[in-house]
Amino acid sequence: MLSEFDIIARYFTQPCRRTLLGVGDDAALVQPAPGMTLAAATDMLVAGRHFFADANPRQLGHKALAVNLSDMAAMGATPRWAMLALALPEINEDWLAEFADGFMALARRHEVDLVGGDTTQGPLNLCVHIIGEVPVGCALRRDGAKPGDQIWISGRLGDAALALAHLQHRITLEIEALDAFLQALHMPKPRIALGQALRGIASAAIDISDGLVADLGHILERSGVGASIDFAAIPKTAILGRHAANPVAREAALAGGDDYELCFTAPLSEKARIGRIAQELELPLTRIGHIDAGDKLVVRDETGKAMNIERRGYDHFA
Ligand code: ADP
Ligand code: MG
């Protein structure tokens, strides 16, 4: 039987590149580069709440880190150091090996060092803590949106929510579309390069984890502004048109969580630069509306009529 220390040594100890002292001591030692601010975030995935207990462990390892990297992207920060607190019901080496592979593959891709954590027995729970660096004064915060700013979205919204709805039998997706949507749900791509490119350009940013309406709502609240967006302008899969009668489809783009795309605001004068970023990153960036001086979020349908936005995204305590 593996001990806690065997597990750490076998699966969670890797050579560190940018770290003074990594796994194995009472605390890790990290040193930000001169002129950098540290950005820190944590996100927990709980079995039965954020994923099914029998979920693919490699995908879970990826997602546990990806959702944290997404918070770095939303701040315009470069992720550097991760910590992993794990509660495991039992020691299953196959599960651990797959989980660690998924986690470490993504960490390597973004040159993130796993520098510590905690491993304990208990109901399956994955908690990642991430620390990144951003040049002093350059972080993308939620509170900088100004009336007149344009609202932008990266990629496409709703795919992850559609995959989840399919798994929960609330919608039946065409088989040819399903693979890509499941990929969006299980293997989200944190938009790190976009966040970094938006330093000095975006006035506010957030990653979409709980749905566009809820997450844009956080920007509006923190910035003390309102917004108007066009439903038709929101980048979403063409598949939605075929399911227009299903309320699940209608809600996916507005209230569906788990997309981990970035929503950001920027003055109109930045339009050309944002267009160039989209080209360089080969990532669609779409304008969906603008910030105004009010205090409401208005979503207009194809005819210009204000839609009734009922579901405000995922709230764990609602
Ligand atoms: P302590 O008892 O001082 O809290 P632990 O015995 O819990 O230390 O952990 C020993 C070392 O292993 C520490 O450096 C800790 O950060 C690291 N560690 C524990 N669990 C993990 C994990 N799941 N992933 C990465 N590092 C871990
Ligand atoms: Mg400990």
Image (spheres, rainbow, N blue to C red):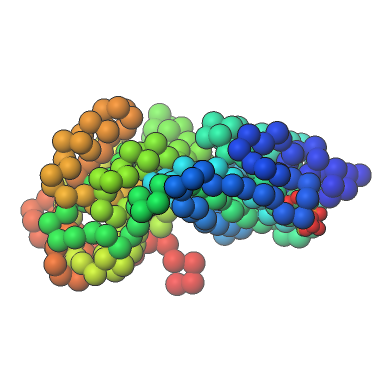
Work out whether residue 131 or residue 49 is closer to the camera in this orientation and state it: 131
Can you say whether 212 is above or below 58 in the image?
A: below
Q: Residue at x 74, y 39 (%)?
A: 13
Q: Residue at x 30, y 63 (%)?
A: 143
Rendering quarter of residue 286: top left
Estimate the x, y position of residue 233 in percent, counting from the top left: 18, 45
Q: Is residue 164 left or right of residue 49?
A: left
Q: Residue at x 77, y 55 (%)?
A: 26
Q: Could you tell me which quadrant the N terminus lies in?
A: top right
Q: Is residue 173 visible?
A: no
Total residue callouts:
0
Q: Could you tell me which quadrant the C terminus lies in?
A: bottom left
Estimate the x, y position of residue 121 in percent, counting from the top left: 79, 57
Work out whether residue 54 or residue 65 is closer to the camera in this orientation and state it: 65
Estimate the x, y position of residue 17 in percent, counting from the top left: 63, 34
Can you say whether 59 is above or below 124 in the image?
A: above
Q: Residue at x 37, y 43 (%)?
A: 195
